[in-house]
Image: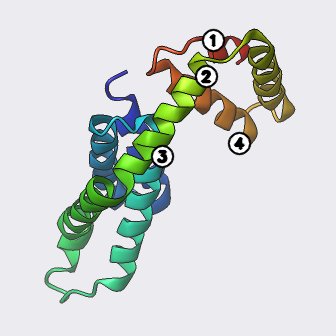
Amino acid sequence: FTLMVPMLSGYIAYSIADRPGLAPGLIGGLLAAQLQAGFLGGIVSGFLAGYIALFIAKKVKLPTSLESLKPILIIPLLGTLSVGLIMFYVVGQPVAHIFELMKDFLNNMGTTNAVLMGIILASMMCIDLGGPINKAAYAFTVGLLTTNTYMPMAAT
């Protein structure tokens, strides 16, 4: 599961900004994993990387001789620098704290609450059969596998 968070982050950024967002997303995901922000940090860094890369692609104007370097060098470099600084100094620690609280809550959950969460997750899985609600429930439970919390996976 070491590369799960960077892949999640990278491909969220890829879906937003295409190829120029992939490298900043992967590196943002690595930072999220190093900062113990888990899959929540990966999601945040993926969105950050995607929208920063999209912003750079739209706003940075280069001479025509350097325009071909923009999607393969300029956007990934500036995007990685921006995402790295934002993740390290602004977003990383609060998201890591939220992730830790969520992990502790799930690990200390009693059987009544666990049954309720199982019902909610199972309902989310069967409502749209492969749509966004289904994917959100599954991503949540797979993300919890990185924290050795296996119980919610039984509902999905």
Q: Quadrant of residue 50?
A: bottom left
Amino acid on which disc 4 is placed: Pro
Residue on which disc 4 sits: 132
Amino acid on which disc 2 is placed: Leu
- The mark lying in front, picked from 4 and 1, is 1
- The mark lying in front, picked from 2 and 4, is 2
Q: Quadrant of residue 38?
A: top left
Q: Residue 116: where, in percent of width, then height?
A: 82, 21
Residue on which disc 1 sits: 151
Amino acid on which disc 1 is placed: Met
Q: CA distance from mark 4 to mark 3?
A: 15 Å
Amino acid on which disc 3 is placed: Ile
Which numbered disc, 4 or 1, marks the residue that appears first in the sequence?
4
Residue at the (36%, 47%) spot, across then down = 93
Residue on which disc 3 sits: 43
The one of 67 and 2 positioned closer to us in this rendering: 2
Of the 4 image quadrants, the one containing the N terminus is top left
Q: CA distance from mark 2 to mark 4?
A: 23 Å
Of the 4 image quadrants, the one containing the C terminus is top right
Which numbered disc, 2 or 4, marks the residue that appears first in the sequence?
2
Near mark 1 (Cα within 10 A), the count class, few <14, some 14-19 or many ≥20, is some
Q: Is residue 104 left or right of residue 136?
A: left
